[in-house]
Image: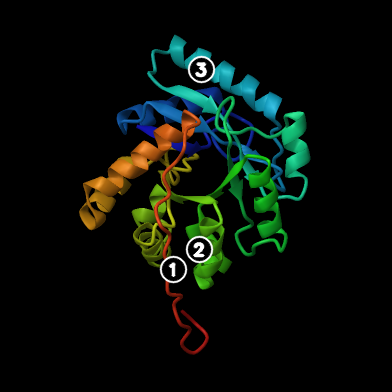
């Protein structure tokens, strides 16, 4: 099983603080049935940068330590890129990482409370340059929850989306859990990933999430998510399915 969004690298963002914590997190992943983790440290985040070359070095070092400690996890380099207007330029100079070498997929994070006005144009420019944006955890974005047609338009125009396992399991609240299920049902979710940061509040929960999805939507849906993660790291075409619209929840007396 592949986890395509995880903060496992030590001491570089809000994930594990030390190598020992990273190794313990990897052991937890192994117990959850995960064999490959894509390391996606924050880049261009208000608090973290983590350019491409530094991430590659950190991944090499962690893989060495995993082998020395007999932990059967392979770590693949990537980034969780906070959306910004210079992404094309940073791709050209190697500051931004796709999912492994010779890969066209990019994991892109929005600010939690808004969608930048230039997003549609940027996504178009990325695709013209043969890159495919993957939207990280859209189910936790305030604007997309209120206006899901925005996400529908992004996906209809070629973007993909990743929903977090802890959103499916309800650990981010009932509202986000419900919206996550709506995204799965509407083919507006293409990957389930942990976005794990630590063993406590932000662990993996992938097996639990897949179990809930199987119960609600069937085995084939779970198989599709797992297959998409494999295709992603192999740089192959990810199957999106026909997106559908999610009906936005109406406000009553100013609240949802």
Between the residue at mark 1 and the residue at mark 3, the CA separation in whole angstroms equals 41 Å
**Residue 205 visible somewhere in the drawing:** no
Secondary structure of the residue carrying tag 3 is: helix
- Of mark 2 and mark 3, the one earlier in the sequence is 3
Q: Residue at x 48, y 84 (%)?
A: 251
Circle 1 crowding by C-alpha within 10 Å: few under 14, some 14–19, many from 20: some
Between the residue at mark 1 and the residue at mark 2, the CA separation in whole angstroms equals 6 Å
Point out residue 40 in the picture as x, y percentages from the top left corner: 56, 36
- Of mark 1 and mark 3, the one earlier in the sequence is 3
Say the numbered circle drawn on residue 63: 3
Point out residue 107 in the picture as x, y percentages from the top left corner: 57, 43
Circle 2 crowding by C-alpha within 10 Å: few under 14, some 14–19, many from 20: many
Q: Nearer the viewer, mark 2 or mark 3?
A: 2
Q: Is residue 19 above or below residue 229?
A: above
Q: Is residue 198 above or below residue 152?
A: above
Q: Nearer the viewer, mark 1 or mark 3?
A: 1
Pointers 1 and 2 in contact (CB under 8 A)?
A: yes
Point out residue 3 in the picture as x, y percentages from the top left corner: 42, 36
- Of mark 1 and mark 2, the one earlier in the sequence is 2
Secondary structure of the residue carrying tag 1 is: loop
Q: Is residue 118 above or below residue 247?
A: above
According to the picture, the residue beneath numbered tag 2 turns out to be 152
Between the residue at mark 2 and the residue at mark 3, the CA separation in whole angstroms equals 37 Å
Camera-side residue of 255 and 225: 225
Q: Residue at x 31, y 33 (%)?
A: 32
Camera-side residue of 5 and 231: 231
Secondary structure of the residue carrying tag 2 is: helix
Q: Quadrant of the N terminus?
A: top left
According to the picture, the residue beneath numbered tag 1 turns out to be 245
| Residue closest to the far front | 128
């Amino acid at each position: 099983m592949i986890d395509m969004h995880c903060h496992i690298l030590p001491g570089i963002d809000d994930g594990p603080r030390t190598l020992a914590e990273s190794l313990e997190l990897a052991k937890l992943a192994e117990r959850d049935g995960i064999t490959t983790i894509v390391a996606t440290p924050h880049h261009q985040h208000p608090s973290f940068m983590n350019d491409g070359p530094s991430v590659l070095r950190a991944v090499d070092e962690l893989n060495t330590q995993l082998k020395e400690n007999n932990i059967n996890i392979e770590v693949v380099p990537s980034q969780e890129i906070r959306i910004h207007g210079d992404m094309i330029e940073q791709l050209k100079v190697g500051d931004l990482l796709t999912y492994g070498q010779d890969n066209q997929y990019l994991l892109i994070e929005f600010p939690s409370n808004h969608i930048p006005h230039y997003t549609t144009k940027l996504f178009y420019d990325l695709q013209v340059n043969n890159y495919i944006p993957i939207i990280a955890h859209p189910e936790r974005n305030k604007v997309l929850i209120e206006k899901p047609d925005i996400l529908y338009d992004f996906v209809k125009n070629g973007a993909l989306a990743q929903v977090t396992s802890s959103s499916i399991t309800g650990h981010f609240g009932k509202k986000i859990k419900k919206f996550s299920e709506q995204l799965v049902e509407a083919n507006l979710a293409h990957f389930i990933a942990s976005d794990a940061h630590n063993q406590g509040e932000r662990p993996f929960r992938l097996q639990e999430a897949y179990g809930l999805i199987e119960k609600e939507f069937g085995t084939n849906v779970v198989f599709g998510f797992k297959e998409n993660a494999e295709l992603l790291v192999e740089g192959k075409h990810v199957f999106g399915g026909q997106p559908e619209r999610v009906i936005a929840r109406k406000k009553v007396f100013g609240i949802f």
